[in-house]
Every structure is written in structure tokens, then in C-alpha cells.
Image: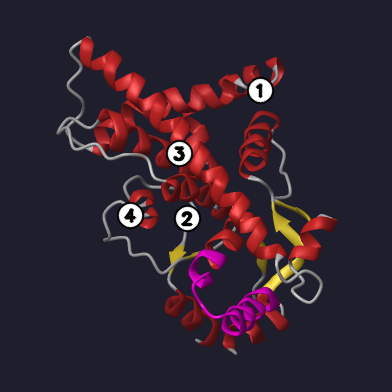
Amino acid sequence: MKLQNAVDTGAIVIPASYTVIEETVSLLRDRGEEEYKAQMRSVLNLIDKTRMVKAHHELIRDDLLSFAYQRSFVRTTAVPENFERILDLSIDPNGVQELAEEIRAFYDHAATKRQKDFDRLIAETTEKGFTGFNDFPTAWAIAAPIIVDSLVSRLPREAKRLCKKHGLGNLLNIKSIGMAVTYESWLLYSHWLRGDGSRGKVKASEQGDFFHAISASAADIFVTEEHKEKYGRLPYILSQVPIKRLTIMNLKELLHTLTS
């Protein structure tokens, strides 16, 4: 009721996004049909059905161009017609689940591809005598500039030149870039660069968290029930490196700000 009132009065806006839909369906998929529909309807009633967060690659591209040309970009876009139908359970009650399955399949594919890349890198670097890094901050300090340079390399020539002119290190002060680089560095560390040999296999959920982190950069407040103290979870990872203007709250903390 507090959330609905805050949405109805315009105190907060909860934009739609592919990542939120996928995670919501994942939580509710084992419920009975009626309970699933009732809870999904509650969620969809809170979401702004006219605007949605841009895709992760669009957010990164826009922020890089914003940095290059020193201008701002809108971080949401109009909800496309096919997505409007998905957000309306009365029109297409199965559409939400179908979309979530498509997103989950994309995460699975991306995780499998990443693991193949890591397996190759591990074999190559082990052969050369690489022993890894003792901790994540050390790995991040090495990996972050390389990842930033890789992101900038995909831009048109003039935009690349302007980014370099403004200082590539300053890109980490942009929230979406800082979050993307931090999480990417964590994946590199966890599945390749760590020196204790306890590398895990890349999970689809980790790939989902990577896209979720970038999507969350479009919001003023990232609301999650995961704790910063929980090793390997998204808030924990993002707390390992200072990221400007990143505010993470759980639902109880958000509700407190709405009623205080």
C-alpha cells in the first residue's frame, strides 16, 4: 500500500526493465496459477508502463557519448508496443513468462560463452606461469583501465578521441561505467584471475546480475534484498569499489524514506 501510494502520488517512479521482469517471474514461477497472476499483477501495477530502462548496451553507449560530447542523455525510452502487451496480463497472461524464458536462455548462452573464453584464458596464462592475484582490489586496479579502454574502442573515431582528451580514468566516475567495470572485473577475478585456484564456473545468474547492475545505474535508488555482507552477491561486489552516486537499499529502508 505504501509503495502503491508513492507511485500514485508521483513520489517515486519504478520504470519497467527486462531484468526486473525476468527476476520477478523467476521468484514466482513455482507458485500456483492464481497466486502467480495476483502477485504479478501487483508488481505490474507498480511499474511505469510508459517508460522503460534502456537496454544495457544502450546505457553504456549513451554514457560514453555523453562523456565524449559533454551532453546528457535520457536513460529511459518509450515502452515498445510488443512490451506493452506483455505488461498487460489481461491481454497476454502468458507473455510475461515467455519473455522471462527468452531472457533466461540469453543469460545461459552468454554464461556458456564466457566460460569457454575463461577456459581458454586459464590454459594460456597457466602455460605462461601466471599465478593470479591475491585479492580483488589488486585485480580491479589492473583490469579496470583495460576494460574502460575496450569500451571506448567501440566508439566512432571522434568520440574515442574526445574520451581520451577528457581522461579515460574519469569514465569510472560515471555510475553505469563504474558499475559495469566493477562487475566485469569481478567476473574476471572470480573465474580467471584469482590466485588461490578456487575459480567457479560462470552461472547464468551472474550474467543476469551483470545486466542488472547496468540497468540499475539508470535509477536513483537500487532496491534489492541482497546484503552487502553476502560474499559474491551483487551489492557485495558493487561495494568493493567506491562508485559515485550509487545508493543501494532494501525494501524496508526504502519504505522508511517514504514515510519519514
Membership of 30 in magenta stretch: yes
The label shown at residue 234 is none
The label shown at residue 236 is 4
Q: Which residue is mark 1?
A: 155
Marks 3 and 1 close (CB-CB < 8 Å):
no
Q: Within 10 angstroms of label 4, few (less than 14), some, or many (20 or more) residues? A: some
Q: Which residue is mark 3?
A: 111
* Dot 3: element: helix
Give the mark nearest the N terminus, 4 or 1: 1
Give the mark nearest the N terminus, 2 or 1: 1
What's the magenta region? 25-45
Q: Within 10 angstroms of label 1, few (less than 14), some, or many (20 or more) residues? A: some
Give the mark nearest the N terminus, 4 or 3: 3
Q: Main secondary structure of the magenta part?
A: helix
Q: Is residue 56 above or below residue 162?
A: below
Please name the colour scheme applied to the rendered image: secondary structure
Q: Residue furthest top?
A: 128
- Residue 126 lies, in percent from the top left, at 22, 16
Q: Tell me if 223 is positioned left or right of 35 in this view.
A: left
